[in-house]
Amino acid sequence: MKTDFVEIFQTIRAAMQPYATLGFANRENSDRTYDLWSDKNIKSGPDQRSETFFASISADQHEAVLKTNFGHEVLKGASVLKIKELDEELMNQIEDALAVGYKLFKEKEWV
């Protein structure tokens, strides 16, 4: 069980990093924040966007925070997870959610 927020951040960031080679780009990549965005031009309803947020992880002195643009569809209704402890089960759920989120983005042709 991990309780150090920097270690939690680094573990989740490591799981997110492979997605940077699958069509996502970083806006922030620091020792406390890592995010992924699609730069593909998409039309969503009447709106046209030139970028779409996928996911981010950040850490402060109190918790690590995972935000997603697909969480409400995957992570039991949550698009923001505040993580104070990270065990293997939660890490597996996060990795599965990232994979499902990526699949959703691919199906919508957002990446």
Image: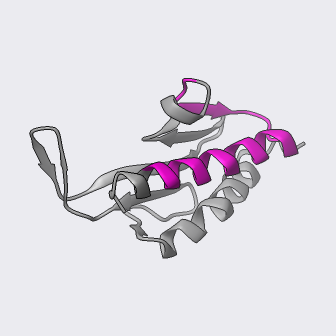
Q: Confirm whether the magenta stretch covers residue 41.
A: no
Residue furthest to the front in view is 107
Query: Residue 91 at what x, y percent from top left?
Result: 76, 46
Query: Residue 17 at what x, y percent from top left?
Result: 58, 67
Horizontal arrangement in the rendering, residue 105 relative to residue 3 (left or right)? left
The correct choice, above or below, for 85 with respect to 36 in the image is above
* Residue in front for this viewpoint, 66 or 46: 46
The correct choice, above or below, for 111 with respect to 79 in the image is below
Q: Quadrant of the N terminus?
A: top right
Residue 59 in view of the camera: yes
Residue furthest to the right in view is 1
Question: Which portion, as a residue range, is magenta?
Answer: 77-104
Query: Residue 84 at what x, y percent from top left?
Result: 74, 33
Q: Residue at x 79, y 36 (%)?
A: 85
Q: Quadrant of the C terminus?
A: bottom left
Name the main secondary structure of what is drawn in magenta: helix
Q: Residue at x 61, y 25 (%)?
A: 76
Q: Confirm whether the magenta stretch covers residue 95.
A: yes
Q: Residue at x 41, y 66 (%)?
A: 26
Residue furthest to the left in view is 46
Residue 79 in view of the camera: no
Query: Hey, which quadrant is residue 110 in on the image?
Result: bottom left
Q: Residue at x 19, y 61 (%)?
A: 41
Horizontal arrangement in the rendering, residue 82 relative to residue 86 (left or right)? left
Query: Hey, which quadrant is residue 87 in on the image?
Result: top right
The correct choice, above or below, for 22 with respect to 45 in the image is below
